[in-house]
């Protein structure tokens, strides 16, 4: 056992792949850069020794940013468009809604306004509110524009998509502003008419998923996943170059432990995650769920040294992670709650066991993620190597024939979402898949 651990801890494979991904530049869904990232990942998986390595191409709604602006009392305030915002120009009163809790929308008359909300939540609130949830609350209450204010200081406007599966382009123009610009807008212009302008090119496009395999050719399989796309404004090192680097590192390690794999391991690096989990939804709709033993989805790894695994209430997944942590005397945090974001979710919502693998964090939201500051030098190779050791053994454990991870009925997943207060947000964004 010690030999493979030493190999992983001295490997440069994943780290080199991460550097290659961030150096592409723009990996926006549907772009030439995303395609290049997928091809580099395909080639890295071939080099690692995986078989049946291929690209699966699918159509997506393309979106390319143009110029955006906020004009308030003859001043121009810096902003960036949120992907899949419609191209539009509106003039309306600005309403600063603070955190943008559901009750905040109920308490104000927002008809015909431009609504501004923060990207975080107050300490007392019991769940995270996703950007798209706040956006669609604004739409539902008659707003004509949406301003998303970063809570992280540093003059960093946040990005992040709007839109739904049925209507990929959002209903009202939407922009992100930095914490500092948001504070200025709230202090000087709350209640004043402002002009919000978004320019964008909406077009047809293609994305692709990267698939590869290791281990015996069994019907049952463990999925090891990530996403290769990133927002166009940044290198996308944390979100999610590191996750795809982890997939490549795990493939390299598992190829050398092929005799330890008792069921097939399928590696999938998804495209178009950042614009609505399009790649993983495509995969979930075209593959057999019953043959999936478990999903190990890396999205947010390497940010901190300690792994955090959201287990979605699957007791067998929690037990497996605990066993690996105890085996190495290394902490692994497990979070039993539902996590309806990232590429595990198109499967987990139907009862397929899946982890969302990330790092522990004391911050609300993404930190540097979805901003210009998501860059390579903020990550450490040591952390990638340590986490790869733990995840390699976790995948080997899940691929054992005597390890069973029970699937759950979709009704159980729906009930858990209701119990945890998440159903409201999923419904308002048009993502509730269950019969009412």
Image (spheres, grey):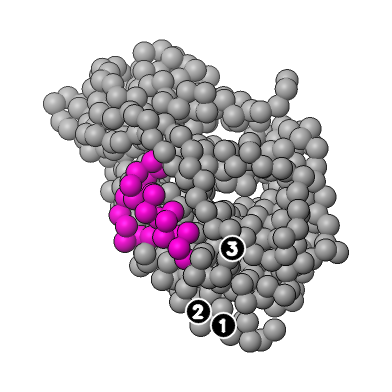
Q: Is residue 41 magenta?
A: yes
Which stretch is magenta?
A: 21-44
Does the image show residue 111? yes
Residue position marked by numbered label 3 in the rendering? 51
118 to 107, vertically: above or below: below
**Disc nearest the viewer among 3 and 1:** 3
Seen from the viewer's position, the closer of residues 128 and 95 is: 128
Residue 11, label in figure: 2
Tell me, yes or no, whether the two marked residues, 2 and 1, touch with CB atoms within 8 Å: yes
Q: Residue at (69%, 51%) from the top-left corner?
A: 354
Occupied quadrant, residue 213: bottom right
Q: Residue at (73%, 74%) from the top-left corner?
A: 260
Real-space CA distance between mark 3 and mark 2, rounded to the nearest whole angstrom: 21 Å
424 to 413, vertically: above or below: above
Image coordinates of residue 74 in percent, x first then y, are: 13, 26
Seen from the viewer's position, the closer of residues 178 and 413 is: 413
Q: Name which of mark 3 and mark 2 comes first in the sequence.
A: 2
Image coordinates of residue 145 in percent, x first then y, are: 35, 22
Does residue 287 appear to the left or right of 412 in the view shown?
left
Image coordinates of residue 12 in percent, x first then y, are: 46, 77
Q: Label 1, secondary structure: give it.
A: helix
Occupied quadrant, residue 68: top left
Residue position marked by numbered label 1 in the rendering? 7
């Amino acid at each position: 056992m010690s030999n493979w651990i030493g190999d992983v801890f001295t490997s440069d494979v994943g780290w080199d792949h991460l550097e290659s991904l961030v150096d592409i530049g723009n990996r926006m869904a549907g772009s030439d850069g995303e395609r290049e990232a997928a091809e580099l990942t395909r080639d890295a998986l071939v080099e690692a020794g995986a078989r049946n390595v291929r690209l699966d191409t699918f159509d997506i709604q393309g979106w390319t940013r143009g110029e955006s602006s906020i004009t308030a009392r003859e001043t121009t305030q810096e902003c960036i468009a949120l992907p899949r915002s419609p191209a539009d120009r509106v003039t309306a009163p600005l309403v600063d809604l603070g955190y943008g809790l559901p009750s905040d929308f109920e308490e104000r008359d927002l008809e015909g306004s431009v609504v501004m909300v923060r990207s975080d939540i107050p300490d007392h609130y019991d769940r995270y509110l996703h950007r798209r949830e706040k956006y669609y609350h604004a739409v539902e209450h008659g707003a004509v524009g949406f301003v998303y204010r970063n809570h992280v200081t540093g003059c960093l406007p946040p990005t992040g998509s709007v839109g739904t599966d049925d209507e990929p382009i959002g209903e009202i123009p939407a922009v992100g502003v930095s914490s500092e610009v948001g504070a200025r807008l709230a202090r000087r212009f709350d209640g004043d008419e402002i002009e919000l302008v978004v320019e964008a090119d909406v077009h047809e496009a293609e994305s692709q998923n990267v698939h590869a395999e290791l281990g015996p050719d069994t019907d049952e399989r463990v999925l090891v996943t990530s996403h290769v796309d990133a927002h166009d404004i940044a290198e996308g090192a944390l979100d999610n170059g590191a996750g795809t680097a982890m997939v490549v590192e795990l493939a390299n390690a598992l190829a050398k432990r092929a005799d330890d794999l008792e069921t097939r391991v399928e590696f999938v690096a998804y495209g178009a995650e950042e614009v609505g989990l399009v790649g993983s939804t495509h995969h979930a709709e075209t593959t057999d769920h019953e043959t999936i033993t478990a999903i190990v989805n890396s999205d947010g790894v390497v940010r901190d040294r300690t792994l955090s695994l959201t287990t979605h209430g699957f007791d067998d997944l929690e037990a497996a992670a605990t066993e690996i942590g105890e085996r190495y005397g290394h902490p692994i945090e497990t979070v039993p709650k539902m996590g309806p974001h990232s590429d595990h979710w198109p499967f987990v919502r139907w009862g397929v066991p899946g982890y969302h693998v990330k790092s522990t964090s004391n911050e609300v939201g993404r930190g540097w993620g979805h901003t210009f500051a998501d860059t390579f030098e903020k990550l450490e190779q040591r952390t990638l190597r340590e986490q790869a050791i733990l995840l390699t053994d976790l995948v080997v454990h899940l691929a054992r024939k005597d390890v069973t991870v029970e699937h759950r009925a979709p009704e159980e997943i729906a009930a858990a979402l209701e119990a945890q207060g998440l159903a409201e947000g999923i419904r308002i964004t048009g993502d509730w898949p269950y019969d009412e």
